[in-house]
Amino acid sequence: MSFAIIAVFTVAGALAAMTLRNLVHCVLALVLAFTGLAGLYLQLGAQFVGFAQILIYVGAVAILIVFAILLTRSHEPLTRLAVAPGWVTSSLVAAAVFGILAWAIRSSAISTLPIPPRPEVTVKQIGDALMSQFVLPLEVIGLLLTAALVGAVTIAMREQRRMK
Amino acid sequence: MRAPVSYLFVSAIIFAIGLAGALIRRNAILVLIGIELMLNAANLNFIAFWRYGPHPEALTGVVFALFSIGVAAAEAAVGLALIIALHRHFKTTNLDRIDSMRG
């Protein structure tokens, strides 16, 4: 039952994030969707991922998007919903992708597999795995984040006047 | 509907919504939001398959979802920096007006 409530909130948030006119309202709806996804992770027993989702997406990415919206706010009127000319085709493509996914889920064998007992995963186990088995990917992701940080600052920095 | 199937359906719905938004909306920031929604749908799939897969004690799904969140955060930072740079150059975030490289 709680799954249905969280799922409805998540899908409604995602829908609103993609259909509202005001960009700030879109981000608020996006926060709702991210929080709902964190709730789904918690229901699935992945506590650490759920809290990481709240910390990173709700705490950092959403705020970053709000900052970008405020920094790029232009004086164009909001009266018209800005959609692409080929929106019918785009909707059909998205609907077709959903149809293929739904067909694949319905016809897959996952619905016949036995449901395993709820795994008990502690943060300590995840930390041990990150420090032993997955230490190389962890280092690579650290390098990627450093490069992304430097790259983002370089791209967004105001262009220097050319030297005479 | 059995539990794993319902989670996969929610993930598919969110993915389709994100795809439709990224294709239809013309604001660069909204396109980025659509991409974030698609990445989150993929994360939900990782966690669902980890929970209902045969070896949840191996932790691979959880660790993969964590790395996916990290990559998505890097992508969001670079994408928003690009949007800010574009806005400084073109004075708009409407993708239809940023057409100087159109063939």
Image (spheres, coloured by chain):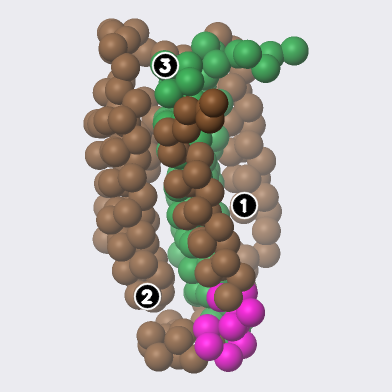
B98 vs A121: above or below: above
Q: Where is residue B83 in the image (x, y as percent from the top left)?
A: 46, 31
Q: Are marks 1 and 2 in contact (CB under 8 Å)?
A: no
Q: Are marks 3 and 1 in contact (CB under 8 Å)?
A: no
Q: Residue B91 carries which label?
A: 3
> Between A143 and A100, which is closer to the camera in this rendering?
A143
Q: Tell me which residue sits at (42%, 33%) in the image.
A: A158
Residue A164 highlighted magenta (yes or no): no
Instruction: Please report, as a chain letter, where disc 1 is located.
Output: A
Colour of the chain lettered A: brown
Q: Where is residue B47 in the image (x, y as percent from the top left)?
A: 50, 67
Give the residue at mark 2: A48
Label 2: few (<14), some or many (≥20) within 10 Å?
some
* Amino acid marked by disc 2: Phe
Label 1: few (<14), some or many (≥20) within 10 Å?
some
The chain assigned the colour green in the figure is: B
> Between A42 and B85, which is closer to the camera in this rendering?
B85
Q: Give the range drawn in magenta.
A: A130-138
* Amino acid marked by disc 3: Lys
Q: Tell me which residue sits at (50%, 35%) in the image.
A: B82
Quarter of the image for residue A46 reads bottom left
Label 3: few (<14), some or many (≥20) within 10 Å?
some
